[in-house]
Image (spheres, rainbow, N blue to C red):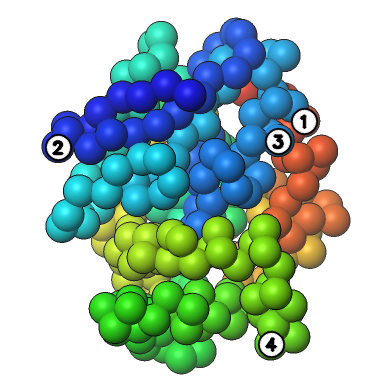
């Protein structure tokens, strides 16, 4: 484990694996170095890339300086990029896509970019139930009710009630979700006004327009149509971007499915 600091002094923990061109992996909600898909993916990619995984602000060993502002997470990602040689490749998943796009819009240097399933509910293809769940999660967290916040988030993203019940009894899952439940508010702040079924918000349109590097916007073939639509919208909004459906995958894409996609796309940089 290595340590760096963001512009506001917040401690950020990260790891480097492998050798070759730099590749930074940006997690979505709940996930970090010790929980989620990126550790296994980093190991799979390490033979061809210098892979960096990090704990986003408020997660595990990274700090969490108050008050939260999306601009601080953009600075966090910039601090991680500063730990590698030259502009890196970036792979972002879920709410990490919103963070990455906003960071690039703010001037973050990158080489190539792969985005997987930004959870944007756009153009009437999907409206979360309840539509005010962002506000409800904030209220639950303010009241200290982390369990209810996690349950509401899981229900909104499509986990069935029985699945949530089972997760609550899994000692290697629920405590890890609960520990970073406060960062759900951070992810929702980064998503901005993308959860009400309207068009892609102007701030994200501008961020997409600022992307000037080869970009792949991908979704899983088994994911719902609104996820496909979100990936297609980003592919149209980012100059020169391409869109791809990865067969047999959903939002929890497997390492064996995404690793070859990343290797192929990033290797094209030469």
Q: Residues within 10 Å of mark 1 (few under 14, many from 20)?
A: few
Task: Residue 216: tell me if it is visible.
Answer: no
Task: Residue 76: tell me if it is visible.
Answer: yes
Tag 2 residue? 8
Nearest to N terminus: mark 4 or mark 1: 4
Residue 250 appears at what percent x and percent y? 73, 60
Name the mark nearer the viewer: 4 or 1. Answer: 4
Tag 1 residue? 260
Q: Is residue 217 left or right of residue 72?
A: right
Tag 4 residue? 161
**Mark seen at residue 186:** none
Q: CA distance from mark 2 to mark 4?
A: 40 Å
Q: Residues within 10 Å of mark 3 (few under 14, many from 20)?
A: some
Q: Give whichever of 256, 210 is nearer the camera.
A: 256
Q: Are marks 2 and 4 in contact (CB under 8 Å)?
A: no
Q: CA distance from mark 4 to mark 1?
A: 34 Å
Q: CA distance from mark 1 to mark 2?
A: 37 Å
In which quadrant will I find the C terminus? top right
Residue 161 appears at what percent x and percent y? 69, 87
Q: Are marks 2 and 3 in contact (CB under 8 Å)?
A: no
The answer to whether residue 49 is above or below residue 31 is above
Q: CA distance from mark 4 to mark 3?
A: 28 Å
Q: Is residue 74 left or right of residue 269?
A: left
């Amino acid at each position: 484990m290595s340590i760096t600091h963001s512009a506001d002094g917040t401690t950020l923990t990260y790891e480097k694996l492998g050798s070759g061109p730099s590749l930074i992996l940006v997690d979505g909600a709940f996930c970090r170095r010790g929980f989620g898909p990126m550790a296994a993916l980093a190991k799979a990619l390490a033979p061809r890339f210098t892979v960096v995984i990090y704990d986003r602000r408020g997660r595990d060993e990274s700090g969490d300086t108050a008050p939260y502002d999306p601009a601080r997470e953009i600075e966090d990602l910039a601090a991680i990029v500063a730990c590698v040689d030259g502009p890196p490749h970036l792979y972002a998943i879920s709410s990490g896509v919103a963070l990455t796009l906003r960071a690039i819009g703010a001037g973050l240097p990158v080489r190539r970019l792969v985005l997987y399933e930004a959870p944007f509910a756009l153009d009437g293809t999907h409206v979360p139930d309840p539509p005010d769940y962002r506000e409800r999660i904030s209220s639950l967290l303010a009241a200290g009710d982390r369990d209810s916040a996690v349950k509401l988030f899981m229900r909104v993203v499509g986990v069935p009630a029985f699945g949530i019940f089972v997760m609550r009894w899994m000692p290697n899952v629920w405590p890890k979700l609960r520990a970073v439940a406060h960062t759900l508010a951070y992810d929702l702040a980064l998503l901005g006004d993308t959860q009400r079924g309207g068009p892609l918000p102007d701030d994200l349109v501008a961020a997409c327009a600022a992307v000037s590097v080869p970009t792949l916007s991908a979704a899983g073939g088994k994911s719902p149509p609104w996820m496909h639509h979100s990936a297609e919208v980003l592919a149209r909004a980012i100059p020169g971007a391409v869109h791809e459906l990865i067969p047999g995958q959903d939002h929890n894409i497997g390492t064996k499915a995404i690793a070859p996609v990343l290797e192929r796309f990033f290797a094209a940089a030469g």
